[in-house]
Amino acid sequence: MRDDKSRTRIAFWFIGLSSLAYITPTILGVFFFYGTLTAALDQELRTLASSIGHAIDLSSGQPRFRDWARVVHTEPARALYAIQLFNLQGTLLESYGIKGSRLLSPKVKELNDQGQQVRLLVTNLDYQGKIIGYLQLEVSTKERDAATKSFIWTMLMIAPFVIAGLSFCGYYVSDKATIPIRKAVVGLRQFLADAGHELNTPLSVVSAYTESLQKKLDKAGLSFDEPAIITNAADRMKKIIDDLSLLAEIESLEKESTYVDLEDIVKQQATEFSIRFQEKNLQFVCRTIPECKIQGNAQALHFLISNLLANALRYTNHGSVEIALQRDGAAVKVVVSDTGIGIPENAQEDIFKRFYRVDKSRSRTSGGSGLGLAIVKAITEAHGGAIEVISVLDKGSQFTVTLPTDGFAGERPQTQPRAQV
């Protein structure tokens, strides 16, 4: 399941980046296409301006067309432009071709004239070294705008097919890309499982011989600390091996998932821990809700609850510990609160890392493997859930595990930040 999610995430990243690689050149292409057509219009206007210079009479001090009306009639293409002559004061003297703006606009290259976008070119008319008027040419940008819109619509119409193709390629490539990762992960899991199995055998021998040695010493009336130290070390090593084996099997939890009653699991663990809390003179409260069924792995959920309660027991010397079940829409929350030593704020994000210890000396003497909370988080996420911790140093901690009722099939719920109390 997690491999499929990783593959899907890689595919989405591939599609996103590929789409960006498609969209960015498309946008740049639109600007380039638009700019090229605009430059072509400007070139047409410059060519027209140079070609009609012979038809302008400047000798009278006022620019006049000689026989431009005849030229317009004999060359219909000229009628696509507005051709205007202005004096120095900006007064329109003559106009030929399409209807122009009738206003001199020397500083404007494009404007909207009566609802129609036009491109302009204004040139000075010099006579004997003096400017005596202006020639203003206008051409409609309708064809340019229509061509640009057609280009945009074409790119938009191809986009779904491009994205569909990228999606297929992305999913295919992500599958190929994750093959080495999946093989490495499978190999690592198998190594952990094999190592755990192989280490358990000599460890059992060590424990058995230590126990036998202790019995012989007792019969001989001798007392040494070494056998007890060896036994404690062997027990701790067995705990680490068991936790590593469970961590390696997390990914296979979905295959063994069923609908389990979380209320029963919490009650069973509460019963087992109640005596241990009494021995430590701690008040223990268990609050459950009926018919609290979720899809999950019962063995893993037992470990999750057990580890949270064991953590609370280990780090709470006085006061109380409470475990509660709460409904939250389509999810169920398991909340374990204590009045223990708390967790420093700078360590709260690290406590779910493997072998991380807030207080190394305390953790080792209390028998912890350093994997408990890492496994709790892995189990929670394997069930599609989320875990958060709120803790104040010397006042206590609260762990909240949010699990969707549809378990592995559900999306991971979003936890809302809460104020520390």
Image (cartoon, grey):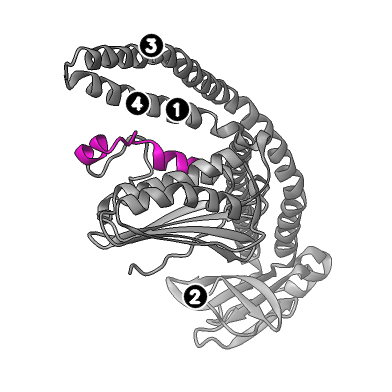
> Relative to residue 404, is residue 361 depicted above or below?
above
- Closer to the chain start, of discs 4 and 1, is 4
Residue visible at 67% across and 34% down in the picture: 255
Residue 310 shows in the view = yes
Q: Position of residue 79 (x, y in %)?
A: 77, 70
Q: Are marks 2 and 4 in contact (CB under 8 Å)?
A: no
Query: In the image, residue 236 lies at what x, y percent?
Result: 33, 28
Residue at mark 2 to residue at mark 4: CA–CA distance: 89 Å
Give coordinates of residue 61: x percent, y percent. Answer: 53, 81
Mark closer to the chain start, 3 or 4: 3
Q: Nearer the viewer, mark 4 or mark 1?
A: 4
- Within 10 Å of disc 1 (Cα), the crowding (few <14, some 14-19, many 20+) is some
Q: Which mark is residue 107?
A: 2
Residue denoted by label 3 = 205
Residue stretch rendered in magenta on the structure: 360-378
Residue drawn at (23%, 23%), measured in percent from left and top?
229
On the image, the x and y values in percent for residue 199 come to 41, 15
- Please identify the quarter of the rendering in which residue 178 is found: top right
User: Mark 2 touching mark 3, by CB under 8 A?
Assistant: no
Q: Nearer the viewer, mark 2 or mark 3?
A: 3
